[in-house]
Amino acid sequence: MSVTTTVASEAAATQAAPLLQVRGVSKTFDVAAGSGGHKKLRALDGIDLELRRGETLGLVGESGCGKSTLARTLMMLERPDTGTVSWDGVDPFGLKGKELLAWRRRIQMVFQDPYGSLNSRMSAAEIISEPWHTHRTMYKTKRDRAARVRELLHLVGLRPSDEHRYPQEFSGGQRQRLGIARALALDPSVVVCDEPVSALDLSVQAQVLNLLSDLQKELGISYVFISHDLSVVRHVADRVAVMYLGRIIETGPTDDVFDHPTHPYTEALMSAAPTLDPSTRRSRILLEGEVPSPLNPPSGCRFRTRCAHATDVCATGVPPSVGRLGNLHIAECHHPRSDAVAV
C-alpha cells in the first residue's frame, strides 16, 4: 500500500463521521501504598482517538502504557474519570436498561489467550450461543440458534460438525477461531482484538490474521487491534496509534507512521521492527533508562527522561500537536523528527 493511496483513502474516510470518538479520556486507579495509604495511578491521561467504519486501528506501545485499560474503557468495563466516549454520537455511559443492553451487542472482544478465554466445560455450540441467552431478542428458537451456530463455525473456518466438541479438543488456532465466532455471535460493528495471535505459532498467526481480514471485507466490521508485534500491526492496520505512559503520542496512516515517525519514541520503536528490505532498514535506536512509573510520571513530555533530543522546554508543559499529510498524521512533540508543523 503506497503512501499516496493511503492518504487518498484517509481523506475520503474523514468526510464521514467516525464510528467511535474518544475525547480527553482519563482514568485513575487507587493503588495501595505503605502504612495503609494509597497512591493515584493515572492509567489514561487525556486520550483522543477515532475509529472509522470498516477500519482497523492498530494500538501499540510498551507493556504498562495503558492499552488494556483503554480497551476495557471502550468495552465499558471501566468508566472514565473525565472525557467522553461517543459511538455514532451516543455516549454509552449514559445509557441504561434495554438501551444499554442493545448497545453492548455492537462491540465485542477477542482475547489474547485462546486457552483461558473459553470454558472447557461448554461445547462449541454452547460457547457461541451463550450470548443469546442474555440478548433474548436474537434467534429465539432452538432451531434458529442451532442453524446460526453452524453458520458461524463455517464462517470462521471450522466444520459445522465441530459444534459438539469441547475447547480442549481443538488446536490453539482452532480455539481462537472459536473465540472469533463467539465475538461475531451478536453481529457487532466493532471487535476489540487484544493480542489475538501472540499465543499462536507463526503459521497459525497468518491464518487467523487472514481470517480477520476476510471477515472485515465480508461483514464491514471495524477492529481495534492491540499488539506488541509491529510487523503484524503493519500488515493488518489502516491506521496506527502509539501509546506511551497513558497518552497517545502519535497517530496516523500505518505506512506513514512506520516510514516517517514523528515522535522520538515512535522512531525508536520503529527502528526495532525487523524488515527484509535493505532499503528500509534503520539503525537501531536504543532507549536508555527505565519507563517512568505511572504513579509519578515526569512533568511535561512523558518521554523526556529517555529522549536524546529533550531540552528544558520538554519539562514545562504538554507538548504541542504537530501534523503531516494535511494533519492525517499527528504527534505530540516539542522536537518532531520529520517535516511536521504545528496543528
Image (tube, helix red, strand yellow):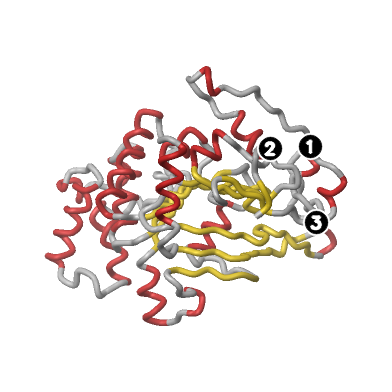
Q: Distance between the residues labelled 3 and 1?
A: 16 Å
Q: Quadrant of the N terminus?
A: top left
Residue found at x 50% / y 62%: 74
Mark before the other along the chain sequence, 3 or 1: 1
What residue would you read off at disc 1?
Answer: 309
Sequence order check, earlier mark of 3 and 2: 3
Q: What residue type is labelled 2?
A: Arg
Q: How far apart are marks 3 and 2 (CA)?
A: 19 Å
Residue lying at the far right in this picture: please name it. 312
| Front residue of 178 and 272 | 272
Q: Is residue 264 above or below residue 246?
A: above
Name which quarter of the figure residue 220 lies in. bottom left
> Mark 1 or mark 2, which is nearer to you?
2
Q: Which amino acid does label 3 sit on?
A: Gly
In the foreground, 165 or 151:
151
Q: Residue at x 42, y 46 (%)?
A: 8
Q: Quadrant of the C terminus?
A: bottom right
Q: How many labels does the image show?
A: 3
Instruction: State how far apart marks 1 and 2 are (Cα).
Output: 10 Å
Q: Name the residue under label 2.
A: 337
